Amino acid sequence: MSVPLYVPAGEGEYVDIRDTKRTYLKLTTPQSNGEFGFFEHHMAPEAKGASPHIHKQSTEMFYVVKGEIEFTIGDRKVVGEPGAFAYIPKGEPHGFTNRGTEDATLLIMFYPIYDREDYFRGLGRLTANGRNPSMDELREHMAKYDQFMV
């Protein structure tokens, strides 16, 4: 059962992933009873982010808090500045990068969540200490959490 939750700024569980400075897991599967996920994603300048992919079961939403995020949505690219919002229904190809030379912050939301926090935790493990996982490792990990490269 989900209960009210308050997570102060700069607090909560987090994961460090390769060129992502830090991803805070603000609302997870157990906390929302699997209904919704909310993540605060801090990206280093020119960080690659997520290559184009789809989710078969989840809708994903993004809100740019800081910086310039280049979104790939279908076959088009758009640059989101602070205040920009992107809604990606399940099955729609999308990806993102920090196209700027400054740090960027992106809020990422999933509905339903399907243990998405474990996706981020796993990426942290796969890329720990500068490790570069193979494409097979990445594809296998992504598929566990409803993410498929296009």
Image (cartoon, rainbow, N blue to C red):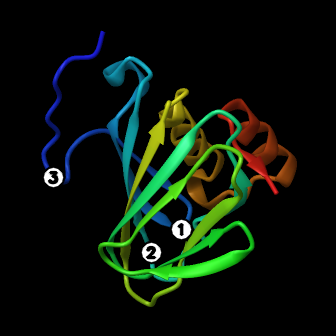
Could you give the CA–CA distance between mark 1 and mark 3, rounded to whole angstroms?
21 Å
Q: SS for tag 1?
A: loop
The correct choice, above or below, for 34 with respect to 50 in the image is above
Residue 93 in picture, x, y percent from top left: 71, 58
Residue drawn 62% across the image and 53% down it:
127
Residue holding disc 3: 9
User: Toward the viewer: 63 or 17?
Assistant: 63
Could you give the CA–CA distance between mark 2 and mark 1, rounded to whole angstroms?
6 Å
Count of marks overlaid on the render? 3
Pick whichever of labels 2 and 1 is earlier in the sequence.
Answer: 1
Label of residue 44 in the image: 2
The correct choice, above or below, for 9 with respect to 94 in the image is above
Question: Would you say 143 lies left or right of 12 here?
Answer: right
Residue 88 in picture, x, y percent from top left: 56, 54
Residue drawn 55% across the image and 43% down it:
59
Q: Quadrant of the C terminus?
A: bottom right
Residue holding disc 1: 19
Residue drawn 80% across the image and 38% down it:
140
Within 10 angstroms of label 1, few (less than 14), some, or many (20 or more) residues? some
Could you give the CA–CA distance between mark 3 and mark 2, rounded to whole angstroms?
19 Å
Pick whichever of labels 1 and 3 is earlier in the sequence.
Answer: 3
The correct choice, above or below, for 53 with respect to 125 in the image is below
Residue drawn 82% across the image and 53% down it:
134
Residue 55 in picture, x, y percent from top left: 67, 43
What type is the residue that disc 1 sits on? Asp
Pick whichever of labels 3 and 2 is earlier in the sequence.
Answer: 3
Q: Are marks 2 and 1 in contact (CB under 8 Å)?
A: yes
Q: Using the rendered view, name the quadrant where residue 84 is placed.
A: bottom left
What type is the residue that disc 2 sits on? Ala
What type is the residue that disc 3 sits on? Ala
Within 10 angstroms of label 2, few (less than 14), some, or many (20 or more) residues? many
Question: Would you say 78 lies left or right of 101 here?
Answer: right
